Image (spheres, rainbow, N blue to C red):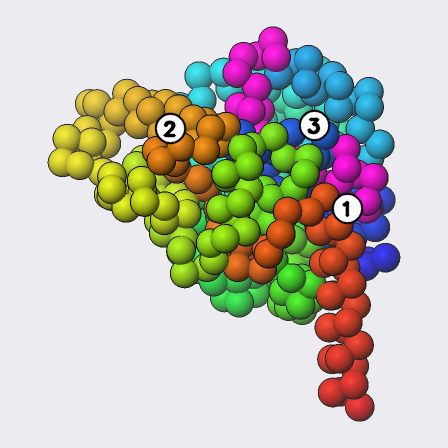
Amino acid sequence: MINTWLTETFKIKYPIIMAPMFLVTNNEMLKEAAKNGIMGCIPALNWRSPEEFEAGIKDLKENCPGPYGINLIVNKSNIHLKKQIEICAKYAPDFIITSLGSPEEVIKKCSPNGTKVFCDVVDLKYAIKVQELGADAVIAVNSGAGGHAGPTPASILVPLLKEGCSLPVISAGGIGTGTALLSALALGSDGVSIGSPFIATKESPVSEGYKQAVVDYGAKDIVMTTKVSGSPCTVINTPFVQKIGTEQNFIESYLNKNKKFKKYAKMLTYYKGMKLVEKAAFSATYKSVWCAGPSIEFTDKIETTKEIIDRLISQYEAAVKELQKRMV
């Protein structure tokens, strides 16, 4: 075992969270994660309705052999948020990760039932805010993350948060090898959140084209776009992405900045973008928008969830031994 706050709190073998990925993470992946010493998290929006979400979380509650988490988008783009919070309060997942907004309501409704609340943060200012609201840990979303990445590298962000707030810090982004896991722990993080390497798993529900893209493309092929959700998001630079560009057009940009229309424009952009991602996730066509982070650099084949975890830990152990040799 690797002992950190994360492993001790959730009784898991390794301090790794399988990150929540829109339309990628599913219940089967979370169950496999739990069987192999880590824990997974799934976006509530991976279910298309609150009713489907309730059925899904009920399945995890009854059949997942270890701890599991739910990711909630807590800004106004998520029209199902109120109902999702009610369902989480009812079924009490082991943890919730909040993204893109204030976690206040989630903490108020779900913490009393024993659910730990982790909050995505990209800077110290927001970490202090969620600490004051009663969050249990922060997810330090760094510049190596897939999806909605932060602006700061892990080597700066993790020590900054460790020094400036008292919450456990989980590093999210750029972990594709066991050596990177060791590096994140050496920085002071209490665990890591790993997403992109798990896209190309046999348990993943996405298209073979998406999985193969994760294998075939690398770090240099990851670009940032505002086309998907209105917020900067990392995607694989496929021919379609090159064709449509990565910046919002004038009208999209104007609407998102206008105070009167901003709320509705953001909801529309998010809806349009998610529909685009949904199409790309399940059908390998030319019109593909595939979210991923630069850690796909280290994915060279499609594996099982177990094989990826075993490889990461084997590499980690080898890196520890090598470091010990150098310290003699």
User: In this figure, which residue is indicated by the disc labeled 2?
Assistant: 276
User: In this figure, which residue is indicated by the disc labeled 3?
Assistant: 27
Taking the view exactly as shown, the residue that stands out farthest to the left is 250
Query: Is residue 238 shown left or right of residue 100?
Result: left
Asked if residue 46 is among those painted magenta in the image, a careful observer would answer yes
For label 3, the crowd category at 10 Å Cα-Cα, with few meaning under 14, some 14 to 19 and many 20 or more, is many
* Separation of marks 3 and 2 at Cα, in angstroms: 23 Å
User: In this figure, which residue is indicated by the disc labeled 1?
Assistant: 306
* Residues at marks 3 and 1 touching, judged by CB atoms closer than 8 Å: no
Give the image location of residue 303, x and y in percent.
69, 47
Is residue 119 visible in the rendered image? The answer is no
* Residues at marks 2 and 1 touching, judged by CB atoms closer than 8 Å: no
Give the image location of residue 64, x and y in percent.
80, 28
Up the image or down, 277 lies above or below 160; here it is above
Between discs 3 and 2, the one toward the N terminus = 3
Query: Is residue 119 shown left or right of residue 181?
Result: left
Residue at x-position 81% and y-position 44%: 36
Mark 3 or mark 2, which is nearer to you?
2
Between discs 2 and 1, the one toward the N terminus = 2
Give the image location of residue 219, x and y in percent.
46, 59
Residue at x-position 48% and y-position 32%: 281
Asked if residue 156 is among those painted magenta in the image, a careful observer would answer no
Image quarter of residue 264: top left
Residue at x-position 69% and y-position 54%: 191
Span of residues in magenta = 31-52
Q: Nearer the viewer, residue 280 or 156?
A: 280
Query: Is residue 286 shown left or right of residue 245?
Result: right
Is residue 241 visible in the rendered image? The answer is yes
Up the image or down, 129 lies above or below 4; here it is above
Give the image location of residue 294, x and y in percent.
48, 56
